[in-house]
Image (cartoon, grey):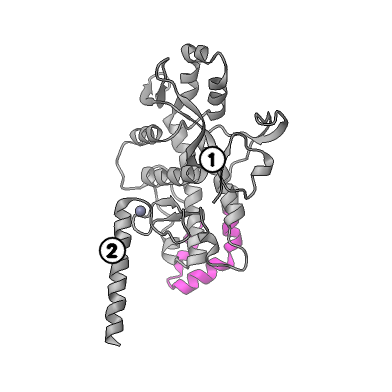
Amino acid sequence: MKQIPTEFFSITEIGGVGEMIYKAVRFPECVPEYDHERKEDTIVPICTYLQRPESGTDYSITGQELLAGLCNLYKKINAPDYSVDITDMVWDWCRNNIQPYNIEILCQMMEQENYGDYLLSGEITSYGTFDVCDFVKDLCKLGSAYEYYDVLMQVRYNHDVAAGRALYYEGRICDSMPFLEKFRRFDNDEQFLCEFNKEHQDLKSNVLDMFPDIRWRLKINPKTGKIEMGVDVQSVFDIAWYTFARMVADVAPPVDEDLDYMYSQGSILTCMACGEYFVRHSSRQRYCNNPKCQAERNNRKSREHYKRKKNNTKE
Ligand SMILES: [Zn+2]
C-alpha cells in the first residue's frame, strides 16, 4: 500500500488515498508526576536545552499502526483481570511512542526561529504535559468503538458467532459495547447469525454514532503557500479516529460480500495466536510479527501438514 507523508491533511485527502504518515513530536524522555493541587496523575515530558524533542513527518508510525497500537493498549488497560498500574501503562506507551497531545501546536513552536525561547520559558513542557485520566478517557472511547466494529466484521464476514457472544464484558475502566447482548438468547449459532444479519445496518450505524466530530480549520499549506481547508490534528486520537473513519468508509466490504475484500493489504487484523491487533503488510498474513506468534504459526502449519499427510496415507 502506498504510504504518503502528511505534512498537511486537506479535505481531498480524507478519501481512500494510501496510508497516511503523520507529523509527530517525540520527547527524549517523560516522567509521571502527581499534581497535588488537582489530585491528578500527569505525564510530564523532559525537555532541556540539550535534551530537545524532535518533530516532523515520522516515517515509523502510520495512522494504522497508531490505531492498532492504541486499541491493543485499550484491551490491556481495560482487561478485567489486569492489575498493572494504569499510570505506569500510559507512561510506558508514551516512552515507546510519540507525544500524544498538542501535536500541531508543538510542531509550530519547534519550527519557529525563536524556538529556544519557548524551550527556556517552559512553554514546550507545559503543552507537552497531559493528565493520565484524559488519555484513558480518550483511549476507552476509541478502543471500545474499534472493538465493537471489529466484532461486527468478524460476525458478519467470518460468521464468528463466538466473537459476537464474547463482545460484552465489564472492564476495569469501562464496559464494552452491549449492542449484541440481545442476540445471546439465541443458543443456536445459525439463529444468532440470522437475527444479527437482519439488524446489521442498525448495528453498523451505532459505530458511526461513536465517531467524534471532525474539526476543520483554514490553514496555509506549507508546500504551496495556498490557503486550504484542513483537518485539525492535535492528538494521536485525532489521527487514530481519522484512520478508523477511512477504514469504515473505504474498506467496509461492499454489498456483494466479497470475502477477501476486508483482508486487502494494509488492513488491521487480529493475530490468530495472541489476539492482538496488527497491521497486515502482505495479503496472506494472519499472525502478528511477534516471534512467539510466528513460531506458533509454523507449528500449526507443520501440524496441519502432518495431519494431511496422515489422512492421505489412510485413503
Ligand atoms: Zn500475535
Q: Magenta stretch: give its range.
A: 178-206
Residue at numbered disc 2: 299
Where 227 sits versus 205, above or below? above
In this rendering, would 113 be left or right of 147?
right
What residue occupies the far bottom of the structure in this picture? 315
Disc number placed over residue 291 in the picture, else none? none
Q: Is residue 199 magenta?
A: yes
- For numbered disc 2, what is the local secondary structure? helix
Kind of residue indicated by mark 1: Ile
Q: CA distance from mark 2 to mark 1?
A: 35 Å
Q: Name the residue tied to disc 1.
A: 21
Which amino acid lies under the numbered mark 2 shown in the image of this protein? Asn
Give the mark nearer the N terminus: 2 vs 1: 1
Please state the horizontal and vertical placement of residue 132, each as a whole percent of the image. 42, 31
Secondary structure beneath label 1: strand
Residue 166 is inside the magenta segment: no
